[in-house]
C-alpha cells in the first residue's frame, strides 16, 4: 500500500530548539488555554496524534489512559523520559495514514500542529474518525492559510498564492496551510459535527512578542480565542468536533491489555498475537516490533522504507 510522504522528526531536537529555547512560550500557553476550553472533563482513553516529546500530554489530566502516537521513535523516547513508563501511557510509533487501532476504540483524540505536515489531510482525518467511537470528541489544530498576514501580503502583491481559495498551500516542502472552510468540509463529509472553533496566536508577531510581556499577550489572546466562532483570521485554529453516526459506542471499560487496542495496519486483522518482542498478525503474517515499551507499526519487521522526509525545524 502506498501512502503520501511522511514528515519525519526522527533524531530531531524539535522539543528543545522549537519549544524550550525557541521563544514559543506564548504559543504554548495559549494552546494550554484552548485545550482546557475544549477537552472533555474526563474520559477513558485518549489518542494523541503526533504526540512528539509529550509537550501537551500532561494537559490531558481527566483521561484514564493516553495513547501517544508519533512517527518518530526518538520523539517517543523523549516522551517516555518525561512521562515515565506506566500503564497510563501507551507509546506507539505509527503512520497516521495507516492507524493500527480497532474501530471505535477511543472516546477522544487530539491532533495539534500535525495536520500541517499532511499531504493528504482528508485521508488522515478519515483514519481518526474510524478510531473514534460514536460520540467521541476530536480536537484538531490546523495552520490557517486565511490569516491576516497572508491576506495583506497577497493584496500587496508580495505573495503569489491566494489565501481565499479552498486548496491547501505547501509553503515549504511538507508544510501546509489550510482554508478553514476546507477543513470544515472534510470533517463534515467524514461524519463529524463541529461544536466549537477557537482562534489562536492573534499576536504571533516577532516585534510584539519581544516588546510586550508574554502574560499580557496570553491574556488578550485568551479573550480573542472566542471570536473563532465568527471568523478565523489567525495563523492557528482549534476545532472541537464530535464523531457522529456509526453503530460503535464507547465501551464502558477500555480493555486492560493494550494488545486488544491494535489491529494490523497492513491487513486490518485483529487481535494480534503477543510474542513478547513483537506482535504477529495471523491474517498476513506480518510482525510488528515491540521494543523498550514502544509498539512499532511503521514497517513490519525485516523491511525498510524510504517514504519519509526529514523535518526542517522552522
Ligand atoms: Zn496483517
Image: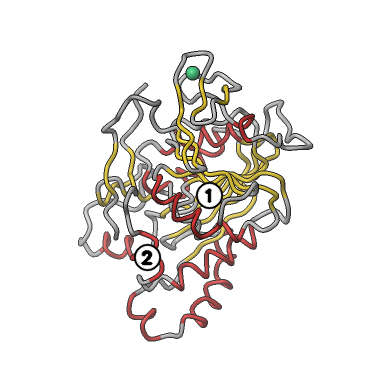
Q: Which mark is residue 222?
A: none
Which mark's residue is nearer the viewer, 2 or 1?
2
Circle 2 residue:
16
Residue depicted at 26% across the width and 54% down the height: 312
How far is the residue under mark 2 from the one under mark 1? 23 Å
- Placement of 271 over or under 130, stated as above or below: above
Q: Which residue is outermost to the right? A: 252
- The image shows residue 313 at horizontal and vertical percentages of 29, 58
Disc tally is: 2
Task: Give the quarter of the figure containing the N terminus.
Answer: top left
Q: Name the residue located 48 percent from the left edge and 78 percent from the top edge.
A: 217
Crowd class of label 1 (few under 14; some 14 to 19; many from 20; radius 10 Å): many
Whichever of labels 2 and 1 marks the residue nearer the N terminus, that label is 2
Q: Which image quadrant is residue 24 in?
A: bottom left
Regarding mark 1 in the picture, which secondary structure is present there? strand
**In this image, 80 relative to 9: left or right?**
right
Residue under the image location 54 percent in, 33 percent down: 189
* Residue 68 picture location, percent across and down: 53, 46
Q: Against 103, is 286 above or below?
A: above
- In terms of image quadrants, where is residue 73? top left
Q: Is mark 2 within 8 Å of ligand 1?
A: no
Helix, strand or loop status at disc 2:
helix
- Does any portion of residue 122 appear in the rendered image? no
> Mark 1 highlights which residue?
140
Q: How is the image coloured?
A: secondary structure
Location of residue 59 in the rendering, given as x and y in whole percent from the top left corner: 60, 61
Residue at image point 30% right, 29% down: 304
Viewer-proximal residue among 243 and 159: 243
In the image, taking residue 115 as reference, residue 41 lies left or right, namely right
Amino acid at each position: 500500500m502506498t501512502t503520501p510522504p511522511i514528515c519525519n522528526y526522527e533524531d530531531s531536537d524539535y522539543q528543545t530548539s522549537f519549544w524550550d529555547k525557541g521563544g514559543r512560550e506564548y504559543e504554548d500557553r495559549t494552546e494550554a488555554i484552548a485545550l482546557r476550553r475544549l477537552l472533555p472533563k474526563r474520559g477513558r482513553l485518549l489518542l494523541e496524534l503526533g504526540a512528539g516529546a509529550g509537550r501537551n500530554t500532561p494537559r490531558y489530566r481527566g483521561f484514564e489512559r493516553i495513547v501517544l502516537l508519533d512517527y518518530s521513535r526518538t520523539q517517543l523516547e523523549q516522551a517516555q523520559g518525561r512521562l515515565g513508563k506506566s500503564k497510563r501511557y501507551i507509546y506507539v510509533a505509527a503512520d497516521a495514514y495507516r492507524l493500527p487501532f480497532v474501530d471505535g476504540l477511543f472516546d477522544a483524540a487530539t491532533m495539534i500542529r500535525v495536520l500541517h505536515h499532511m499531504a493528504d489531510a482528508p485521508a488522515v482525518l478519515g483514519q481518526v474518525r474510524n478510531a473514534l467511537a460514536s460520540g467521541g470528541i476530536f480536537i484538531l489544530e490546523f495552520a490557517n492559510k486565511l490569516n491576516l498576514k497572508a491576506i495583506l501580503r497577497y493584496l500587496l502583491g508580495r505573495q503569489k498564492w491566494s489565501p481565499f481559495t479552498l486548496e491547501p498551500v505547501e509553503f515549504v516542502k511538507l508544510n501546509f496551510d489550510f482554508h478553514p472552510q476546507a477543513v470544515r468540509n472534510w470533517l463534515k463529509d467524514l461524519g463529524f459535527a463541529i461544536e466549537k472553533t477557537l482562534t489562536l496566536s492573534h499576536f504571533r508577531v516577532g516585534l510584539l512578542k519581544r516588546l510586550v510581556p508574554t502574560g499580557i499577550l496570553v491574556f488578550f489572546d485568551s479573550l480573542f480565542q472566542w471570536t473563532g466562532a465568527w471568523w478565523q483570521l489567525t495563523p492557528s485554529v482549534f476545532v472541537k468536533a464530535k464523531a457522529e453516526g456509526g453503530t460503535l459506542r464507547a465501551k464502558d471499560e477500555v480493555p486492560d491489555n493494550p494488545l486488544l487496542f491494535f489491529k494490523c495496519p497492513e491487513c486490518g486483522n485483529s487481535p494480534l498475537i503477543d510474542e513478547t518482542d513483537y506482535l504477529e498478525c495471523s491474517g498476513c503474517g506480518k510482525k510488528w516490533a515491540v521494543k523498550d515499551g514502544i509498539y512499532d507499526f511503521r514497517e513490519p519487521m525485516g523491511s525498510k522504507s524510504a517514504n519519509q522526509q526529514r523535518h526542517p525545524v522552522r
